[in-house]
Structures are given as structure tokens and as C-alpha cells.
């Protein structure tokens, strides 16, 4: 479990050792608090974070669009991770 800004996250997927808790903590901003799921990917040795929601089915940030994001916006076979908000602390 990872606790940031009184939010508790669980690592649900990691590809090619893409998760680095320290980098995640440094890059995380309060703007991501509104999302249920966060994808982090490494691009040119820089961590990028993108939030997704499980509530709005018609949203471009709906969780079912994560595979599209990984295929279209990330480098091929790049390290990435997916964390899910489990509860507030």
C-alpha cells in the first residue's frame, strides 16, 4: 500500500519493473486526487502520470481506455504501472 496526501493506493499491475515508489511520490500532485486509477509510464527516463476514472463511462479517461492509452501514447514496451485508489486514510 502507498499513502500519498491521505489517499491509499494499491499497485495492481507492473510491467518491466516500472514502479518506483519514490518517483511516484515526487511526481504525484493533488490534481490526480479526483481519479480512481493512475497509470505511470516511463518515457525518456521521465515518469508520466495519467489519471483514469471508473465512474464516467463516456469519459475519455474511463478505465477501460487504459489499453488504448498504453498503445497509443506510450513508447512500445515501456515500463509502466497501474495503481488503484483503495480508500482515504
Image: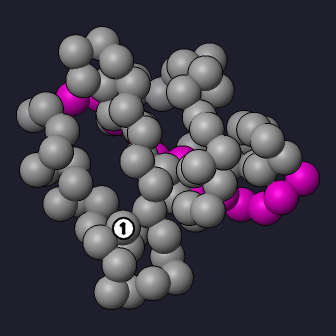
Residue 10 seen in this snapshot: no
Q: Residue at x 79, y 61 (%)?
A: 87
Count of numbered badges drawn on the protein: 1
Q: Whole-percent x and y of residue 75?
A: 13, 32
Q: Which residue appears farthest toward the top when viewing the image?
A: 45
Q: Residue at x 30, y 13 (%)?
A: 45
Q: Main secondary structure of the magenta part?
A: strand
Q: Which residues are magenta?
A: 78-89
Q: Residue at x 30, y 60 (%)?
A: 66
In the rendered view of the protein, which quadrant contains the N terminus?
A: top right
Q: Which residue appears farthest toward the front when viewing the image?
A: 31
Q: Whole-percent x and y of residue 77?
A: 15, 32
The answer to which quarter of the image holds residue 60 is: bottom left
Q: Residue at x 48, y 70 (%)?
A: 53
Q: Give the left or right position of residue 23, taking residue 47 as reference.
A: right
Q: Quick one: 28 or 65, which is closer to the camera?
A: 28
Up the image or down, 78 lies above or below 36; here it is above
Q: Which residue lies under the disc numbered 1?
A: 61
Is residue 22 one of those drawn in magenta?
A: no
Q: Give the left or right position of residue 66, taking residue 17 as reference.
A: left
The answer to which quarter of the image holds residue 36 is: bottom right
Q: Whole-percent x and y of residue 40?
A: 41, 38
Q: Which residue appears farthest toward the right when viewing the image?
A: 89
Q: Whole-percent x and y of residue 49?
A: 43, 39
Q: Secondary structure at mark 1?
A: loop
Up the image or down, 84 lies above or below 74; here it is below
Up the image or down, 50 lies above or below 61; here it is above
Residue 84 seen in this snapshot: yes
Amino acid at each position: 500500500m502507498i499513502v500519498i496526501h491521505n489517499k491509499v493506493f494499491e499497485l495492481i499491475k507492473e510491467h518491466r519493473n516500472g514502479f518506483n515508489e519514490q518517483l511516484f511520490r515526487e511526481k504525484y500532485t493533488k490534481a490526480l486526487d479526483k481519479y480512481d486509477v493512475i497509470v505511470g509510464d516511463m518515457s525518456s527516463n521521465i515518469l508520466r502520470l495519467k489519471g483514469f476514472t471508473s465512474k464516467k463511462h463516456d469519459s475519455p479517461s474511463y478505465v477501460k481506455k487504459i489499453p488504448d492509452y498504453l498503445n497509443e501514447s506510450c513508447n512500445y514496451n515501456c515500463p509502466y504501472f497501474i495503481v488503484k485508489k483503495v480508500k482515504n486514510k
